[in-house]
């Protein structure tokens, strides 16, 4: 635990969701406390692991009222940070709540659904002055990827990159908010945002984007970045797993640079805590850090699907190095 700074009070939206446990763990491991949480679903026994005394609400309006009550009470009880793990389409509304009650926001990916939502949040940051908007871009703190970025900084060549990410999801996925394009943004936004941010962070800004496949469960295309040409494929259909891993693992994650595999499968469990540590120290990821990938996934969602070239593409045949 980090006790170098005074304990901060956190509130959290979407506490029954998949990603919330990583945030609860990060709040605890950075020496802070959760004072309130909200989720329309009440399967939140996870709270007992770290914060059994946290107030819990199933109605957002009552949660809102509680945070406002804390804001008007003793300074020691006021919420300093609101962590947002709610469905994607609610992120900007919950960020606005955080700013309104005088708290910084720490929001899961994607920060917002559309680029113009970022502009409004930037205006609100300036209006409220006291508070900032932060997001979780945890791949940027992965040791192996930091080392790769340092290595790439010394190269002046143009790179050939191939991204393939298949993460099996069951029938439930399509019936949940994640399967609703209007709420999640679809596959490219919901499961691709971190990888697109990573690619832009490693290889520079987007100069050209083509979409060659866009379906409910998979998407693929081509990116021309400043320093790389990228073929990408994303899928939540287990049938797209390479034969070599089917039946052995539910997820296949592969990024190759100039034919060489980047190994970063391990070390994921503690990355949220690292991001929290940096954020609390004033070195977190903000609105402008998130903007390039938000703009890209918006363009991917709204692009016309083009015919794939004759060159092999990840979604035509997944290859394992």
Image (spheres, rainbow, N blue to C red):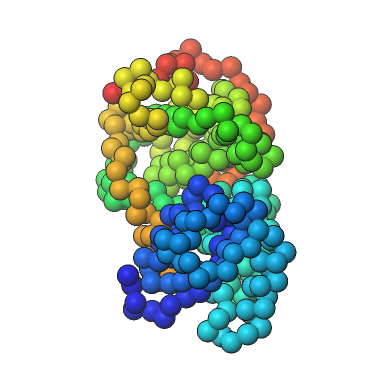
Q: Position of residue 310 (x, y in %)?
A: 48, 12
The reply to whether residue 104 is in sight is: no
The reply to whether residue 106 is in sight is: yes
Count of numbered circles on the image: 0
Which quadrant: the C terminus? top left
Residue at 50 percent of width and 31 percent of height: 169
Q: Residue furthest right?
A: 61
Which quadrant: the N terminus? bottom left
Q: Residue furthest top?
A: 310
Residue at 45 percent of width and 21 percent of height: 240
Along the line of sight, the residue nearer the viewer: 265 or 67: 67
Q: Position of residue 161 (x, y in %)?
A: 38, 31
Residue 38, compared with residue 205, is above or below; it is: below
Residue 278, compared with residue 240, is above or below; it is: below
Q: Position of residue 198 (x, y in %)?
A: 43, 44
Along the line of sight, the residue nearer the viewer: 158 or 289: 289
Along the line of sight, the residue nearer the viewer: 217 or 63: 63
Q: Residue furthest bottom?
A: 74
Along the line of sight, the residue nearer the viewer: 213 or 96: 96
Residue at 62 percent of width and 51 percent of height: 41
Left or right of 65? Residue 31 is: left
Residue at 55 percent of width and 52 percent of height: 43
Q: Position of residue 197 (x, y in %)?
A: 47, 45
């Amino acid at each position: 635990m980090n006790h170098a700074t005074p304990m901060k009070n956190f509130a959290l939206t979407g506490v029954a969701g998949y990603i919330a446990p990583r945030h609860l763990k990060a709040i605890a491991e950075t020496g802070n406390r959760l004072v309130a949480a909200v989720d329309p679903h009440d399967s939140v026994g996870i709270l007992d692991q770290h914060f059994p005394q946290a107030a819990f609400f199933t109605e957002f309006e009552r949660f809102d009222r509680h945070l406002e009550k804390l804001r008007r009470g003793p300074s020691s009880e006021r919420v300093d940070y609101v962590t947002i793990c709610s469905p994607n389409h609610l992120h900007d509304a919950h960020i606005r709540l955080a700013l309104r009650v005088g708290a910084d926001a720490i929001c899961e990916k994607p920060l917002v659904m559309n680029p113009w939502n970022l502009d409004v949040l930037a205006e609100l940051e300036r209006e409220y002055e006291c508070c900032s908007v932060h997001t979780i871009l945890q791949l940027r703190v992965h040791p192996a990827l930091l080392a790769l970025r340092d290595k790439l900084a010394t190269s002046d060549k143009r790179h050939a990159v191939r991204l393939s990410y298949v993460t099996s999801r069951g029938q439930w996925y399509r019936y949940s908010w994640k399967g609703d394009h209007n709420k999640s943004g679809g596959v490219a936004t919901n499961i691709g945002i971190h990888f697109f941010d990573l690619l832009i962070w490693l290889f520079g800004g987007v100069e050209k984007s083509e979409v060659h496949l866009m379906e409910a469960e998979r998407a693929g295309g081509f990116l021309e970045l400043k320093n790389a040409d990228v073929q990408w494929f994303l899928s939540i259909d287990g049938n797209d797993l390479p034969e070599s891993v089917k039946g052995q693992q539910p997820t296949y994650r592969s990024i190759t640079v100039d034919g060489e595999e980047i190994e970063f499968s391990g070390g994921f469990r503690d990355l949220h805590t690292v991001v929290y540590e940096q954020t609390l120290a004033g070195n977190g990821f903000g609105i402008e850090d998130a903007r390039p990938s938000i703009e890209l996934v918006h363009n991917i969602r709204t692009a016309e699907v083009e015919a794939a070239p004759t060159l092999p593409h990840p979604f035509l045949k997944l290859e394992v190095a």
